[in-house]
Amino acid sequence: MSINIDKLLTLLQDALERDDFDAAIKIIEALRGPDQAVLFDELEEDEQKELLPKLKNEISADILEDLDDPEAVKLAESLPLETIIQIVDEMEPDEAADLLGDMSDEQSQALLTRLHDADEVRPLLLYPDESAGGLMTSEFLALHPLMTAGEATEALRAWNPDSEEIYYLFVADDEENLVGIIGLRVLILADPNSVIEKIMDRDVISVNASVDQEDCARTMAHYDLAAIPVVDESGLLIGIITHDDIVDVLEEEATEDVYRLSNLSDSELDPDSPIKEQLKGRLPWLYLNTLTALFGAWVISNYEHIIAQAAVLALFQSVVAGQGGNTASQNIAMAVRTLATEHVGARAQRRIIIRQFFMGILLGVAVGSVVALGVYLWRGNIYLSFVLGLALVANLSFGSMIGVLIPLGLEKIGVDPALASSVLVTAATDSLGFFIFLSLAAHFLQEIQ
């Protein structure tokens, strides 16, 4: 059932204005966890600071976990140390580590020294946020291979995990090396006297703690896993990642790619972000776009005398450049999406490049013939139509190939293909389009005039 956030927000703010915190707390507590965070996020900063400490610590913890990182950090740093300690103690270790990792070193250390579960949080701070180590939780149960199924079941009861998402249990030897995995269903249905090493699966798929979170998401999606163990360089089991964490990663990576394809380097920006942050995230790319546009203008300037003799060329040069850019942009979207979701080997890359070149020829012929016919019917000049049609075939062919070459090349040198693809491709297709069209026009100038 959907909720009316605007109506609830009005009721909540009315309660806060009357200092009726009991009513405000009831409104929050009546909602599901994610809805609590959505409603809370709509409050003004001073209202959030006033209300959060008055909620139950576990509810406050859930709200902080669901808020965007910058907002959660800002709110946490504004609260008294004793208050935030009680709230962070209720957070999942990985969520607590994410919060502390974004806070100032002084406040982070002050919190760590007072947390009850500091030993579970501290190791997670050693890894970058966007790595498997930064994504994992250290809250897991490791079974011993010589345990019986009955003993393992009792250990699971004694552990009494907070999470409802226990799909697999992992098995580690005396040195804490990951040696197997057993599904919860298999464990429950097994004979209580069965030894774990006899019923576990030894073929365990794991990821190293240093692996990028995007690669981790790919691995889980490829093998259709609900959870994956994380090991260190020695193969020791140090944490697990569950599918709910991966959903967050996929959303984050998708947002990042969309922003970067639009030349926004900071995926945390939104229309209401501070002016300074928006300038920092947007202005450098506008400068780069300006430089590439000036390069295109320089290409045109070399044919200034041609355009002066046949002004009609100025009407159509943008058509060639624009269609080449559109074709390349389609390929950028497909290439970036493919590179984000799967590994593309050298052989597949060569096949893709050749296929897209021929695809560009077909698209060029299809578009170029229609445009050429339309221009002939409009202007009555067969040579102008021929030049424009041929230029479209050439630019769409090269544009289609460039649209996959640049993302593949950027990935090969370790740069996110989404970050600069659109800028570089636009510069290439615009300049190439102007050059091809005006060069062809120069050869038929007498007939076009």
Image (cartoon, rainbow, N blue to C red):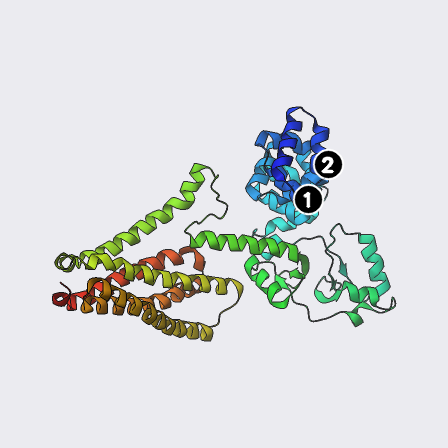
* Residue 155 rendering spot, x and y as whole percentages: 82, 57
**Could you say which is closer to the camera, residue 232 or residue 195?**
195
Q: Element under label 2?
A: loop
Which residue in the structure is indicated by mark 2? 56
* Residue 69 rendering spot, x and y as whole percentages: 57, 43
**Residue furthest out toward the top:** 18
Q: Quadrant of residue 6?
A: top right
Few, some or many residues within 10 Å of mark 2 (<14, 14–19, 20+): some
**Could you say which is closer to the camera, residue 422 or residue 118?**
422
Does residue 293 lie above or below 57 as drawn? below
Q: Is residue 105 visible?
A: no
Which residue in the structure is indicated by mark 1? 33
Residue displayed at 26% across by 55% down: 295
* Residue 437 rendering spot, x and y as whole percentages: 23, 64
Does residue 446 lie above or below 138 as drawn? below
Disc with the residue nearer the chain's start (1 vs 2): 1
Q: Is residue 90 left or right of residue 395?
A: right
Amino acid type, label 2: Lys
Q: Quadrant of the C terminus?
A: bottom left
Check if mark 1's residue and mark 2's residue have beta carbons within 8 Å: no
Residue displayed at 63% across by 54% down: 245
Distance from the alpha carbon under mark 1 to that under mark 2: 13 Å
Amino acid type, label 1: Gly
**Could you say which is closer to the camera, residue 213 or residue 224?**
224
Residue displayed at 37% across by 47% down: 284
* Residue 229 rendering spot, x and y as whole percentages: 67, 61
Frontmost of labels 1 and 2 is 1
**Could you say which is closer to the camera, residue 323 or residue 216?**
323
Q: Is residue 368 left or right of residue 212?
A: left
Residue displayed at 49% across by 48% down: 267
Q: Element under label 1?
A: helix
